[in-house]
Every structure is written in structure tokens, then in C-alpha cells.
Image (spheres, rainbow, N blue to C red):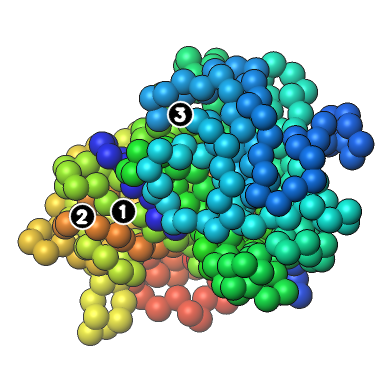
Amino acid sequence: MCNRFSLHVLILAFAVSLLFSVGGHRSAYAASLINGLGGPEGYGQLAMGRNDDGSSSRLNLPFTANFFGTSYNTFFVNNNGNLTFRGSLSDFTPSPFPIADRPMIAPYWADVDTSCSACGEVYVATPNSSTVVVTWDGVGYFDSNATPTNTFQAVLRDRSDTGTGNFDIEFRYADLNWTTGDFDGGSGGLGGTPAQAGFDAGDSTNFFTLPGSRTASVLDLENTSNVAPAEPGMWSFAIRNGDLPGSSAENPLLPTVTGDGFDFDFNTPPNLDDWFFIDPVVAIGYDYTVNSGPNFQSVLLPTGIGDNQYDLHLFDSGLNAFVDSGIDITGGTPFDFGAGGINRFRILGIETAAGLNPNDPRAFVTGLRFTSSGLVSMSQDPIRLNTDPVPEPSTMILLVTGLLGLCVSQWRRGILTKENS
């Protein structure tokens, strides 16, 4: 996943889904589509006739959408899996974001072909004055391939209750089976140049790309999510004040979850004084690791959690373990790691008495700065305490020593564990 922001970039993130793979990418947990909208298939009216690389006429938005500082009241539905604002788009090969002068929202930009009688079609509905639903229902791919098919939706929701022009974007993936049309080097719907999902300001700077885009892994969008509670195949984004998610603490960018924790891939801003804010599931601590890219330069932990004091543990490569640094970090006070930064650290000291809800998307906001600008790939793996049943006193002693960095692999009850759901 790659994204860029021209000014201050903040990432407030929490992870709320796992990869539910059954027999490859297919999953019984794919997102449900919004239906009951009228029309022949329940998805509203046809957006356009059967075609290859065609588009709808200019359609009216029932509300004003502020997308990167420009307000739009109309849009186009393009057969090839995207919506555009300034004009229609016939391009069938997904170019990597950012793209100049093409503001677009793309649930699944690929070489869709609906020209054959069994290729599926594209529908649009406006069920009320605050919602637009566009559905690609069982669509095939070029050249007139009716199998396999993809079914997905883009939903735009008016959120002017939070500010003029604000709106939400939803992508719902019910069934993804192909990535590539024949013209793009695909064979049987796979290979070549696969589909891209995300959205782009059209200013060559601001954009967001969903994980797996332009790779075979784009099919996994059906099995992953960034919403709480987790609904695989469902992706939601808030566009506030014309900006991408991640532009403020109130406008979060939500990452993807792995079996161990949370993975983030993003471009740090040129201004190294800018904070990134990330926030996955709450626990009693977190391990922060840079997998590639610039090191952590400093950290800013939240205020108002328990006693507002946290324990910093640093990684000892000789021991291959985290050890207590003897340093306490106060919430709300930046802590600098010194020249060159570090690529790994652990935070402990979040009291269970604080009662933080593991599903609260804004319960533990962490700020990070980096040693340089550039693409960073990092993970944040939570450590949680299982408080049910309540551990016996002897077990509590083991817990305390374990938090000081001692071996916990032989804990019979497995009290200290990596979050994995």
C-alpha cells in the first residue's frame, strides 16, 4: 500500500480484520452488497448499455462532495471499475497512482467487459438524498469473457453533518475471481497487469492505494477489511475537509491486519516535524518494528490512559529480546531516540484498570516521527492480557516478570499473547 500527502500527514489507524482464506482467495465471509434498490437485479438502473470501455452519461450527485478542495455535484460511472468527476474514462489498463488531472474513486479498476450477453452489467442507484450506490454485478473481462466474474460495489455517503462537502467512501467486494483482461497480458483472467483499487486526487500528489493493487494479491480484498467489527470484503474511508483519510486524528487511515498484528506501508512526508498517528487494537503494550525504510526518530504516546506513564523496552540483539531500558515515557511528551533513531521498540505499562475497549478505533493514538522521508514499511504488534478468568496470585507473579522481558514461552495459561484476531 502506498500513499502520499502534500502537507501534514497523520495516520490514525486501527486494525480490525484478518485474512479469511478458504481454498485460495475465495471466502465465505465476503461483504454483503446493498440490494433492494429496484431495477432488474435489485441494484437500481443500468448505468449504461452493454459495452467495452464505455461510460455513463454525466450523473447528478444528490449531495456536494469536496474531493481534495474541489466540490463536485456530478460524476461518471466507467465500465472499467471506477468513478470519475471531471470527465469519463475509457482506459482499461490501471496506471499506478498518482495520475494527473484524473480525480477518481476506483473500487476495482481493470478491463471489465459487459458486451456479451452473459458478462454481467453495471448499475447505479440513489436510494436517498445522502447515498449513491454503484454495482458491478457479475462482470466479465476483455475479450467478452463471461467466466470467471467479479461482483463489487462503490458507495458514496453524504457526511455533511461533520462539515460541508464531507463524505464517506465504501468499497464492498462480494466475489473477486479475475484480475486482468486479455489485452493486458492476462490469461484466464489472471497475470499481466492486475487491477488497482483506491482513489486519487488527480493532482499528482495525493492518493491512496489499497493493499495488493496491481498484483495478484488484489483478489484478497474480498477477504480483508478495515472496519470494526471486521467484515471481510468491506473497506470504508472518510473524506473530510477535502483531504484523504490520515490528514487528521479525526480522519483516520485504516491499515490491514496480519496474524501477528498490523502492517503499515506509507510515504513519510518531506517535513520530518510532521507526526504520523497509528492506532490498532488496544492491549497492555505494543511492539513497533520498521521492516524497511527510515528508522523511528521519536514517539508521542497518548495522555489520559491510567497513570499517563509508560515503560520503554529496547531490543537487545545479543539476547534477541526486549529489555527494560529503565526509561519511563510520559503521555503527551515527545521522546526522542537519539542520533540515527531505532528500528524496534516495545511499549508496556498500559494498565488493565484503564478498561480500554479493544475494538475502540481511537483508544490509543500513537505519534511517530522518522529519521528521514521516504517509503516506510512497519508493523505494530499488540500484546494483550487475558483477564478471563482472573489469574491466580502465583500466575500474576509470572506475568510481572514476563513483562520485564523474561521468557514467557512456558506459561501454562498463555496469559501474555500476541493479538491475533
Residue at (73, 55) in percent of width and height? 113
Q: Position of residue 292 (x, y in %)?
A: 30, 69
| Residues at marks 2 and 1 touching, judged by CB atoms closer than 8 Å | yes
Residue where numbered disc 1 is placed: 267
In the rendered structure, which disc, 2 or 1, sits on the residue that comes first in sequence? 1
Q: Position of residue 186 (x, y in %)?
A: 63, 72
In the rendered structure, which disc, 3 or 1, sits on the residue that comes first in sequence? 3
Q: Amino acid at mark 2?
A: Ser
Whether residue 350 appears in this view of the structure is: no
Residue at (22, 63) in percent of width and height? 295
Whether residue 209 appears in this view of the structure is: yes
Q: Residue furthest right?
A: 40
Q: Amino acid at mark 1?
A: Asn
Q: Amino acid at mark 3?
A: Phe
In the rendered structure, which disc, 3 or 2, sits on the residue that comes first in sequence? 3
In which image quadrant can residue 252 be found? top left
Give the foreground label among 3 and 2: 3
Quadrant location of the N terminus in the rendered image = bottom left
Residue where numbered disc 2 is placed: 373
Closest to the observer: 407 or 313?
313
